[in-house]
Structure formats: structure tokens, C-alpha cells
Image (cartoon, rainbow, N blue to C red):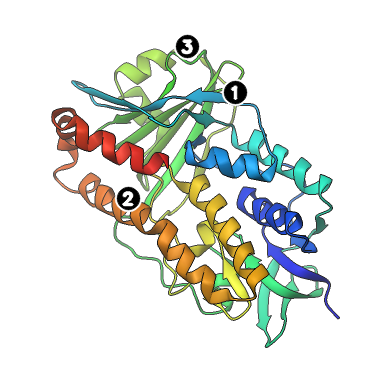
Amino acid sequence: MSDAQLLVAGGGPVGLATAIEARLAGIDVLVVEPRDGVIDKACGEGVMPGAREALDRLGVAPASAPIAGIDYRDVRHSVQHRFSGGPGQGIRRTTLHAALLERARELGVRWVRARVVAVEPGGTSVAVATDAGSRLVGGWLVAADGLHSTVARSVGLALPEPRARRRYGQRRHYRLEPWTDLVEVHWTGVGEFYVTPLAGGVVGVSLLARRGVHYEQALAASGELAERIAGADAVSELRGAGPFRQRTRARVAGRVLLVGDASGYVDALTAEGIRIGLESAHEAVAAICAGRSEQYEAAWGRTTRAFRRMTAGLVRVAESPLRGLVVPAAARMPRLYASGVERIAR
């Protein structure tokens, strides 16, 4: 006997988006998540314009600040491009999660407070063991359990973490009225600072860098950004995440589907995480409704290919001696820069 038509491992934004998509399709859903309430995570919090349609489809409208485009900056240059198809949104991670939680509860999503620790695939169902000692059975399992997915490892889809280009994220919020409606990306000698305007007179400042780079030291040495932040009160604790680079051999194993970060991740450099996560949730549920898991594998490849290639190429440059040429090159070739920004915006 099944506990639900669909089990979702992980109750973060992508797991909840999957559950909401499934309920909108009439599927009974059980989310398996050990943490209660709103879950925070270190991320840039810039939601690209292409994600607006996904949030509208889910019936979610969290408080946000408009994001009109992207501004790459270094000590000498600034190159900006404003999205041609309308603005994105600066949404605090906790605000987004709270809105998704409310919508999921409204639609009748059920929860089990536990962590999936092992998976038992079957021909017509899939069972999971939890750290609470329970065994749950569902018709399908969607893994949305993050960068270091237990489900992906359990079903043999996770590949070893690469040692090269291991990058991490750190983030803190400051009580400061946003001075621009653009996401500023400050290219410094040690990493990239993402400054995201958020609702309520707050900015989020995230650092992407190699392990061992100290946030406060890097911020103090960031020049113009340090001057802007000077004297502003921090309104959140410093959070970290990573390493970002995670690989999977496939996204489907029988009735198990990987979505979001669990499906594989390159880097946060192009800020596509939420956009891709929401799209993968939608495609996974569509494949489940069709009873064809291979449909999801093809859709995942199609929807993420451009992002993966662009991000991988940009990270290679960022980790090479050519790093200092990124912003000057963008300034000299604004049409190419604009094309790249438009690609991640869709």
C-alpha cells in the first residue's frame, strides 16, 4: 500500500514547487523533510525574469524588489544591460520559502518530519527509509534534497565531487536602501560579490569564491562596494554553501527523478538556480503525469544545456589568469554581454 502517489525528498523551494505542481495536476503528495518551517540558505536571491511565469503558475507572489538587469563592475569599468522582457525579482530566500509553504499547505500537501537516508527502487513503486526509522512507499520519488543529495547517491546517480574549481558561496544582508534596480556583480581579485536589491530597504551581498576566502576581509578590500556598505547594520548572520560543482550521471533511475541542485550543478555565477529548479520541477511532474520518466531526462537536458555551457565557460575564465579581463571584455563588447544576460534572463 502506498503512502502517497508522489514522495518528495526535501522541502526547500524546489521541493515545494514540485509538490505544488503535483497537487495542481491532481497528484497526492507527501514531502519528506526533517526541518520545520522556513529554511534559509546562502544564495544570491536574484530571481530572473523567466522565473516569474513559473511563480505565477504556482500561484505564488512573494514580496520582492524589481530587478531591471545586471551590472558587471570592476575598479575601472561598469557594463550594464537591462532585461528586454521585463524585470526579475529580488526575493529573500526566507520570503520565497514562506510563500511556497503557504501555497503547498493551501493545496493539501502532506509532510513527514524526517530525512530520506536510503531508497529501495521497485518496478511499480519506490520505497524510502528515513532517519526516523519509518519506511514510506510512493508511486514515484522526486529528489529535491540539494547539492549533496542522499537520494542521488543511494540510487547510483551521483558522481564523485570534482576537486578542481571548488567554489563556495557566502551571504549576508544589510539594512540599506538599494541604490540601484540592477544586480551588481563586483569582480574582485578573490571572487565575485553579488549585490541584490530586496524589499523592505535591504540588500543582499553574496560572495562566490574559493574555499578559505574570508567574507569580511574580501568585502573590506572591495573598494566601491565596501564604501557603500560601510556603517550599514547587518540584519542576518553570515551563511555559507558549497562546494557548488556537483555532477550526476543521469537524472532518472526508474521511478526516481532528480530536480534542482540534486540533479547536478555547475556554479552560482550566472544566477540561474531558482529558474532552473522551478523548470525542472515542472518537467518532472509532467513526466510523472505521462508515466514516462525518460521524458524528464530529455527535458532536463534541453532546458539546462545553455545554462550549463555558459556557466562552465565563465567559471573556467574566472578561475584562470584571464579573470581580470572579464569586465573589460564585456565593456568592449556590450552586444555580446547583452546577449549573455538575455540568455540567463529567459
Place residue 143 in its image quadrant.
bottom right
Q: CA distance from mark 3 to mark 1?
A: 12 Å
Q: Position of residue 207 (x, y in %)?
A: 40, 36
Question: Which residue lies most toward the bottom here?
Answer: 123
| Quarter of the figure with residue 188 | top left
Q: Quadrant of the C terminus?
A: top left
Q: Amino acid at mark 3?
A: Gly
- Residue 131 vs residue 154, the one in the foreground: 154
Instruction: Please state which amino acid type lies under the numbered disc 2.
Output: Thr
Image quadrant in which the N terminus is located: bottom right
Residue 149 vertical placement versus 334 (above, below): below
Query: Residue 135: x percent and y percent?
Result: 80, 76
**SS at mark 2?**
helix
49 shown above or below 250: above
Closer to the N terminus: mark 3 or mark 2?
3
Q: Which residue is mark 1?
A: 235
Left/right placement of residue 212 relative to residue 177 reads left
Q: Which mark is residue 231?
A: 3
Identify the disc placed on residue 311.
2
Q: CA distance from mark 1 to mark 2?
A: 30 Å
Q: Residue at x 57, y 31 (%)?
A: 91
Residue 40 in sight in this render: no
Q: Does dot 1 land on a helix, a strand or a loop?
A: loop
Crowd band around label 1 with a 10 angstrom C-alpha radius: few (<14), some (14–19), many (20+): some
Q: How many marks?
A: 3
* Residue 201 shows in this picture: yes
**Which residue is at a point 39% across and 36% down the rendered structure image?**
214
Q: Which label belongs to residue 137?
A: none
Q: In the image shown, does 280 or 227 lie closer to the viewer?
A: 280
Residue 141, horizontal then vertical, whole percent = 67, 71
Q: Secondary structure at mark 3?
A: loop
In the rendered view, would you say 86 is above or below 304? above
